DNA sequence: GGGTATTTGTTGCATTTGTAACTATCAACA
DNA sequence: TGTTGATAGTTACAAATGCAACAAATACCC
Protein backbone atom coordinates (compact mmCIF):
# COMPACT_ATOMS: atom_id res chain seq x y z
CA UNK A 1 0.00 0.00 0.00
CA UNK A 2 1.47 3.31 -1.02
CA UNK A 3 0.31 6.80 -0.25
CA UNK A 4 -0.78 7.11 -3.84
CA UNK A 5 -2.83 3.96 -3.86
CA UNK A 6 -4.32 3.21 -0.48
CA UNK A 7 -6.58 0.24 -0.78
CA UNK A 8 -9.70 1.27 0.99
CA UNK A 9 -11.42 -1.46 2.90
CA UNK A 10 -14.65 0.21 1.89
CA UNK A 11 -13.94 -0.50 -1.76
CA UNK A 12 -13.55 -4.23 -1.22
CA UNK A 13 -16.80 -5.88 -2.19
CA UNK A 14 -16.56 -9.00 -0.02
CA UNK A 15 -16.17 -6.70 2.96
CA UNK A 16 -19.05 -4.44 1.99
CA UNK A 17 -21.26 -7.39 1.16
CA UNK A 18 -20.56 -9.06 4.48
CA UNK A 19 -21.22 -5.90 6.42
CA UNK A 20 -24.48 -5.22 4.59
CA UNK A 21 -25.60 -8.84 4.78
CA UNK A 22 -24.89 -9.01 8.48
CA UNK A 23 -26.70 -5.76 9.18
CA UNK A 24 -29.87 -6.76 7.38
CA UNK A 25 -29.83 -10.32 8.69
CA UNK A 26 -29.54 -9.19 12.28
CA UNK A 27 -32.32 -6.68 11.83
CA UNK A 28 -34.74 -9.06 10.21
CA UNK A 29 -33.77 -11.90 12.52
CA UNK A 30 -35.79 -10.28 15.28
CA UNK A 31 -38.96 -10.94 13.32
CA UNK A 32 -38.66 -14.72 13.10
CA UNK A 33 -36.60 -15.30 16.20
CA UNK A 34 -38.78 -13.52 18.71
CA UNK A 35 -42.11 -14.68 17.32
CA UNK A 36 -41.35 -18.22 16.23
CA UNK A 37 -38.03 -19.09 17.83
CA UNK A 38 -36.51 -19.90 14.47
CA UNK A 39 -32.86 -19.76 13.52
CA UNK A 40 -31.69 -18.18 10.31
CA UNK A 41 -31.30 -21.48 8.51
CA UNK A 42 -34.75 -22.61 9.62
CA UNK A 43 -36.27 -19.40 8.33
CA UNK A 44 -34.56 -19.85 5.00
CA UNK A 45 -35.77 -23.43 4.68
CA UNK A 46 -39.33 -22.46 5.58
CA UNK A 47 -39.10 -19.62 3.11
CA UNK A 48 -38.31 -22.03 0.31
CA UNK A 49 -41.12 -24.35 1.30
CA UNK A 50 -43.58 -21.49 1.49
CA UNK A 51 -42.42 -20.10 -1.78
CA UNK A 52 -42.22 -23.28 -3.79
CA UNK A 53 -44.50 -25.67 -1.94
CA UNK A 54 -43.46 -29.30 -1.63
CA UNK A 55 -39.74 -29.88 -1.93
CA UNK A 56 -37.24 -32.56 -1.07
CA UNK A 57 -34.28 -31.71 1.12
CA UNK A 58 -32.05 -32.01 -1.91
CA UNK A 59 -34.08 -29.47 -3.84
CA UNK A 60 -33.84 -27.06 -0.93
CA UNK A 61 -30.08 -27.55 -0.86
CA UNK A 62 -29.82 -26.75 -4.54
CA UNK A 63 -32.14 -23.76 -4.48
CA UNK A 64 -30.82 -22.21 -1.30
CA UNK A 65 -27.16 -23.16 -1.64
CA UNK A 66 -27.25 -24.42 1.94
CA UNK A 67 -25.24 -27.49 2.86
CA UNK A 68 -27.24 -30.68 3.24
CA UNK A 69 -26.17 -30.96 6.87
CA UNK A 70 -27.62 -27.55 7.66
CA UNK A 71 -30.81 -28.35 5.80
CA UNK A 72 -31.13 -31.71 7.54
CA UNK A 73 -30.89 -30.12 10.96
CA UNK A 74 -33.16 -27.23 10.07
CA UNK A 75 -35.77 -29.66 8.78
CA UNK A 76 -35.62 -31.65 12.02
CA UNK A 77 -36.02 -28.48 14.04
CA UNK A 78 -38.92 -27.22 11.92
CA UNK A 79 -40.57 -30.61 12.18
CA UNK A 80 -40.18 -30.63 15.96
CA UNK A 81 -41.79 -27.20 16.08
CA UNK A 82 -44.60 -28.43 13.80
CA UNK A 83 -43.85 -26.06 10.95
CA UNK A 84 -43.41 -28.78 8.35
CA UNK A 85 -44.23 -32.42 7.80
CA UNK A 86 -42.53 -35.19 5.89
CA UNK A 87 -44.20 -37.44 3.36
CA UNK A 88 -42.71 -40.67 2.10
CA UNK A 89 -42.26 -41.05 -1.63
CA UNK A 90 -43.19 -44.64 -2.57
CA UNK A 91 -41.17 -44.66 -5.78
CA UNK A 92 -37.92 -43.62 -4.13
CA UNK A 93 -37.54 -44.12 -0.42
CA UNK A 94 -34.27 -42.22 -0.27
CA UNK A 95 -35.93 -38.86 -0.12
CA UNK A 96 -39.07 -37.50 1.44
CA UNK A 97 -41.26 -34.65 0.38
CA UNK A 98 -41.31 -31.75 2.81
CA UNK A 99 -44.31 -29.48 3.03
CA UNK A 100 -45.42 -26.78 5.45
CA UNK A 101 -48.10 -27.57 7.99
CA UNK A 102 -51.01 -25.19 8.60
CA UNK A 103 -48.90 -23.60 11.27
CA UNK A 104 -45.97 -23.43 8.89
CA UNK A 105 -48.07 -21.79 6.20
CA UNK A 106 -49.38 -19.28 8.67
CA UNK A 107 -45.91 -18.46 9.92
CA UNK A 108 -44.67 -18.17 6.36
CA UNK A 109 -47.51 -15.84 5.37
CA UNK A 110 -46.78 -13.62 8.32
CA UNK A 111 -43.03 -13.61 7.86
CA UNK A 112 -43.35 -13.04 4.16
CA UNK A 113 -45.48 -9.97 4.76
CA UNK A 114 -42.92 -8.73 7.25
CA UNK A 115 -40.18 -9.42 4.75
CA UNK A 116 -41.94 -7.36 2.11
CA UNK A 117 -42.35 -4.50 4.56
CA UNK A 118 -38.75 -4.72 5.69
CA UNK A 119 -37.53 -4.86 2.13
CA UNK A 120 -39.53 -1.84 1.09
CA UNK A 121 -38.25 0.12 4.04
CA UNK A 122 -34.70 -0.92 3.32
CA UNK A 123 -34.86 -0.04 -0.36
CA UNK A 124 -36.84 3.15 0.01
CA UNK A 125 -33.59 5.09 0.29
CA UNK A 126 -32.81 4.32 -3.35
CA UNK A 127 -34.40 5.14 -6.66
CA UNK A 128 -36.07 2.33 -8.60
CA UNK A 129 -33.16 2.36 -11.04
CA UNK A 130 -30.65 2.06 -8.24
CA UNK A 131 -32.63 -0.78 -6.70
CA UNK A 132 -32.63 -2.66 -9.97
CA UNK A 133 -28.92 -2.19 -10.47
CA UNK A 134 -28.12 -3.26 -6.91
CA UNK A 135 -30.25 -6.38 -7.21
CA UNK A 136 -28.78 -7.26 -10.56
CA UNK A 137 -25.26 -6.91 -9.17
CA UNK A 138 -26.07 -9.13 -6.21
CA UNK A 139 -27.60 -11.82 -8.40
CA UNK A 140 -24.68 -11.77 -10.75
CA UNK A 141 -22.15 -11.98 -7.94
CA UNK A 142 -24.09 -14.79 -6.27
CA UNK A 143 -24.31 -16.67 -9.59
CA UNK A 144 -28.08 -16.38 -9.52
CA UNK A 145 -28.35 -14.74 -12.92
CA UNK B 1 -48.67 -15.04 -1.33
CA UNK B 2 -51.08 -14.84 -4.19
CA UNK B 3 -50.62 -15.74 -7.81
CA UNK B 4 -50.69 -12.07 -8.64
CA UNK B 5 -48.05 -11.13 -6.11
CA UNK B 6 -45.61 -13.91 -5.55
CA UNK B 7 -42.88 -12.72 -3.27
CA UNK B 8 -39.74 -13.73 -5.03
CA UNK B 9 -36.97 -14.82 -2.77
CA UNK B 10 -34.66 -13.17 -5.28
CA UNK B 11 -36.15 -9.78 -4.50
CA UNK B 12 -35.43 -10.01 -0.79
CA UNK B 13 -32.26 -8.07 -0.12
CA UNK B 14 -31.09 -9.88 3.02
CA UNK B 15 -31.22 -13.09 1.02
CA UNK B 16 -29.40 -11.65 -1.97
CA UNK B 17 -26.83 -9.99 0.23
CA UNK B 18 -26.15 -13.18 2.13
CA UNK B 19 -25.80 -15.20 -1.02
CA UNK B 20 -23.47 -12.68 -2.63
CA UNK B 21 -21.45 -12.20 0.56
CA UNK B 22 -21.03 -15.92 1.04
CA UNK B 23 -20.01 -16.47 -2.57
CA UNK B 24 -17.31 -13.83 -2.54
CA UNK B 25 -16.07 -14.73 0.94
CA UNK B 26 -15.66 -18.37 0.05
CA UNK B 27 -13.86 -17.51 -3.16
CA UNK B 28 -11.44 -15.08 -1.58
CA UNK B 29 -10.99 -17.25 1.48
CA UNK B 30 -8.80 -19.57 -0.54
CA UNK B 31 -6.23 -16.83 -0.86
CA UNK B 32 -5.58 -16.28 2.82
CA UNK B 33 -6.50 -19.73 4.08
CA UNK B 34 -4.29 -21.80 1.83
CA UNK B 35 -1.27 -19.52 1.96
CA UNK B 36 -1.34 -18.29 5.54
CA UNK B 37 -3.79 -20.56 7.35
CA UNK B 38 -5.86 -17.59 8.45
CA UNK B 39 -9.53 -17.59 9.30
CA UNK B 40 -11.88 -14.95 8.00
CA UNK B 41 -11.86 -12.98 11.22
CA UNK B 42 -8.07 -13.08 11.39
CA UNK B 43 -7.84 -11.82 7.84
CA UNK B 44 -10.18 -8.97 8.63
CA UNK B 45 -8.21 -8.00 11.73
CA UNK B 46 -4.94 -8.10 9.83
CA UNK B 47 -6.53 -6.07 7.09
CA UNK B 48 -7.39 -3.33 9.54
CA UNK B 49 -3.93 -3.36 11.02
CA UNK B 50 -2.34 -3.23 7.59
CA UNK B 51 -4.66 -0.52 6.46
CA UNK B 52 -4.53 1.71 9.52
CA UNK B 53 -1.28 0.73 11.23
CA UNK B 54 -1.19 0.55 15.00
CA UNK B 55 -4.57 0.00 16.60
CA UNK B 56 -5.96 -1.18 19.90
CA UNK B 57 -8.36 -4.09 19.96
CA UNK B 58 -11.14 -1.70 20.78
CA UNK B 59 -10.43 0.41 17.72
CA UNK B 60 -10.53 -2.70 15.56
CA UNK B 61 -13.87 -3.62 17.09
CA UNK B 62 -15.30 -0.21 16.28
CA UNK B 63 -13.94 -0.02 12.75
CA UNK B 64 -14.73 -3.59 11.76
CA UNK B 65 -17.97 -4.07 13.65
CA UNK B 66 -16.58 -7.35 14.97
CA UNK B 67 -17.40 -8.40 18.52
CA UNK B 68 -14.62 -7.98 21.02
CA UNK B 69 -14.45 -11.71 21.73
CA UNK B 70 -13.92 -12.43 18.06
CA UNK B 71 -11.22 -9.80 17.87
CA UNK B 72 -9.61 -11.07 21.05
CA UNK B 73 -9.36 -14.58 19.67
CA UNK B 74 -8.21 -13.45 16.24
CA UNK B 75 -5.49 -11.32 17.84
CA UNK B 76 -4.27 -14.28 19.89
CA UNK B 77 -4.20 -16.46 16.79
CA UNK B 78 -2.40 -13.84 14.72
CA UNK B 79 0.09 -13.33 17.52
CA UNK B 80 0.74 -17.07 17.77
CA UNK B 81 1.37 -17.15 14.03
CA UNK B 82 3.69 -14.14 14.37
CA UNK B 83 1.62 -11.83 12.20
CA UNK B 84 1.24 -9.15 14.85
CA UNK B 85 2.83 -8.06 18.09
CA UNK B 86 1.45 -6.35 21.16
CA UNK B 87 2.95 -3.28 22.79
CA UNK B 88 2.10 -2.11 26.26
CA UNK B 89 0.85 1.41 26.67
CA UNK B 90 2.43 2.84 29.85
CA UNK B 91 -0.23 5.49 30.34
CA UNK B 92 -3.12 3.02 30.30
CA UNK B 93 -2.43 -0.59 30.97
CA UNK B 94 -5.94 -1.66 30.05
CA UNK B 95 -5.23 -1.74 26.36
CA UNK B 96 -2.28 -2.65 24.21
CA UNK B 97 -1.30 -1.39 20.83
CA UNK B 98 -1.39 -4.01 18.11
CA UNK B 99 0.86 -3.73 15.12
CA UNK B 100 1.81 -6.06 12.29
CA UNK B 101 5.19 -7.77 12.38
CA UNK B 102 7.42 -7.89 9.30
CA UNK B 103 5.74 -11.14 8.44
CA UNK B 104 2.34 -9.57 9.01
CA UNK B 105 3.18 -6.64 6.79
CA UNK B 106 4.39 -8.94 4.09
CA UNK B 107 1.26 -11.09 4.30
CA UNK B 108 -0.90 -7.99 4.25
CA UNK B 109 0.87 -6.57 1.21
CA UNK B 110 0.39 -9.82 -0.63
CA UNK B 111 -3.22 -10.30 0.39
CA UNK B 112 -4.06 -6.72 -0.36
CA UNK B 113 -2.72 -7.07 -3.88
CA UNK B 114 -4.75 -10.24 -4.28
CA UNK B 115 -7.80 -8.44 -2.94
CA UNK B 116 -7.39 -5.69 -5.49
CA UNK B 117 -7.11 -8.24 -8.26
CA UNK B 118 -10.10 -10.20 -7.01
CA UNK B 119 -12.15 -7.06 -6.66
CA UNK B 120 -11.35 -5.88 -10.15
CA UNK B 121 -12.23 -9.23 -11.59
CA UNK B 122 -15.46 -9.33 -9.62
CA UNK B 123 -16.53 -5.85 -10.63
CA UNK B 124 -15.42 -6.05 -14.22
CA UNK B 125 -18.86 -7.33 -15.17
CA UNK B 126 -20.36 -3.95 -14.36
CA UNK B 127 -20.01 -0.45 -15.69
CA UNK B 128 -18.29 2.14 -13.50
CA UNK B 129 -21.66 3.73 -12.81
CA UNK B 130 -23.15 0.43 -11.73
CA UNK B 131 -20.16 -0.24 -9.52
CA UNK B 132 -20.55 3.11 -7.81
CA UNK B 133 -24.26 2.59 -7.25
CA UNK B 134 -23.75 -0.91 -5.89
CA UNK B 135 -21.07 0.24 -3.49
CA UNK B 136 -23.12 3.18 -2.35
CA UNK B 137 -26.09 0.91 -1.65
CA UNK B 138 -23.95 -1.50 0.35
CA UNK B 139 -22.45 1.28 2.42
CA UNK B 140 -25.82 2.80 3.10
CA UNK B 141 -27.33 -0.53 4.10
CA UNK B 142 -24.36 -1.33 6.31
CA UNK B 143 -24.59 2.09 7.95
CA UNK B 144 -21.15 2.98 6.64
CA UNK B 145 -22.26 6.12 4.89
C1' DG C 1 -29.25 -61.48 -10.94
C1' DG C 2 -25.13 -59.67 -8.60
C1' DG C 3 -21.61 -56.53 -7.70
C1' DT C 4 -20.22 -51.68 -7.79
C1' DA C 5 -21.01 -46.85 -7.92
C1' DT C 6 -24.29 -42.84 -6.97
C1' DT C 7 -27.58 -40.47 -4.63
C1' DT C 8 -30.06 -38.92 -0.38
C1' DG C 9 -29.97 -37.94 4.05
C1' DT C 10 -28.21 -38.42 9.06
C1' DT C 11 -24.78 -38.51 12.76
C1' DG C 12 -20.24 -37.81 15.31
C1' DC C 13 -16.63 -34.95 16.23
C1' DA C 14 -13.81 -31.02 16.08
C1' DT C 15 -13.92 -26.13 15.20
C1' DT C 16 -16.08 -21.69 15.49
C1' DT C 17 -19.25 -18.58 17.37
C1' DG C 18 -22.31 -15.92 20.79
C1' DT C 19 -23.54 -14.63 25.42
C1' DA C 20 -22.49 -13.64 29.79
C1' DA C 21 -19.55 -13.57 33.50
C1' DC C 22 -15.18 -12.29 34.97
C1' DT C 23 -10.50 -9.70 35.82
C1' DA C 24 -7.84 -5.73 35.70
C1' DT C 25 -7.26 -0.98 35.10
C1' DC C 26 -8.63 3.65 35.11
C1' DA C 27 -12.05 7.75 35.91
C1' DA C 28 -15.07 10.50 38.73
C1' DC C 29 -16.19 12.60 42.64
C1' DA C 30 -17.61 13.03 47.36
C1' DT D 1 -8.55 8.55 50.16
C1' DG D 2 -11.89 5.58 48.97
C1' DT D 3 -15.94 4.08 46.88
C1' DT D 4 -18.52 3.59 42.80
C1' DG D 5 -18.83 3.18 37.97
C1' DA D 6 -16.98 2.71 33.40
C1' DT D 7 -13.76 0.62 30.04
C1' DA D 8 -10.56 -3.03 27.79
C1' DG D 9 -9.92 -7.42 27.24
C1' DT D 10 -10.17 -12.60 28.39
C1' DT D 11 -12.40 -16.83 29.46
C1' DA D 12 -16.07 -20.40 30.26
C1' DC D 13 -19.84 -22.59 28.58
C1' DA D 14 -23.49 -23.53 25.44
C1' DA D 15 -25.07 -23.33 20.78
C1' DA D 16 -24.20 -23.56 15.81
C1' DT D 17 -21.34 -24.95 12.05
C1' DG D 18 -18.29 -27.70 8.72
C1' DC D 19 -16.33 -31.87 7.48
C1' DA D 20 -16.00 -36.55 7.12
C1' DA D 21 -17.79 -40.92 7.90
C1' DC D 22 -21.75 -43.45 7.70
C1' DA D 23 -26.36 -45.92 6.44
C1' DA D 24 -29.97 -46.76 3.28
C1' DA D 25 -31.88 -46.90 -1.18
C1' DT D 26 -31.42 -46.79 -6.04
C1' DA D 27 -28.99 -46.87 -10.68
C1' DC D 28 -25.81 -48.88 -13.63
C1' DC D 29 -23.57 -52.41 -16.06
C1' DC D 30 -21.56 -56.97 -16.80
Image (tube, coloured by chain):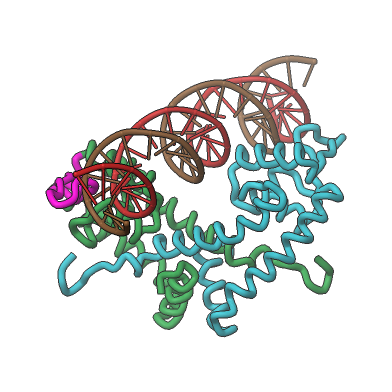
Chain colours: A green, B cyan, C red, D brown
Identify whether A15 is placed above or below C10.
below
Residue closest to the eye, A72 or C1:
C1
**x and y percentages locating residue B120 in the rendered image:** 64, 74
- Find out whether residue A15 is within the magenta segment: no
**x and y percentages locating residue A97 in the rendered image:** 19, 51
Identify whether A110 is placed above or below A86.
below
Identify whether B134 is placed above or below B28.
below
- What residue do we see at 65% from left, 42% from top? B71
Residue closest to the eye, A67 or B102:
A67
Q: Visible in this render: residue A143?
A: yes
**x and y percentages locating residue B33 in the rendered image:** 65, 51
Q: In this view, does A144 lie to the left or right of B123?
A: left
Image quarter hosting the C terminus of chain A: bottom left
- What residue do we see at 41% from left, 79% from top? A132
- Find out whether residue A94 is within the magenta segment: yes
Residue closest to the eye, A21 or D4:
A21
Count numbered badges in the picture: 0
Q: Give the range drawn in magenta.
A: A82-104
Amino acid sequence: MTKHDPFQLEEFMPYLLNRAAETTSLEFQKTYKETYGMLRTEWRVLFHLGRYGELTAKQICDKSDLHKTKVSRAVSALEAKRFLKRTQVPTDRRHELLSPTKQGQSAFAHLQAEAVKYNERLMSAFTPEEQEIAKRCMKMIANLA
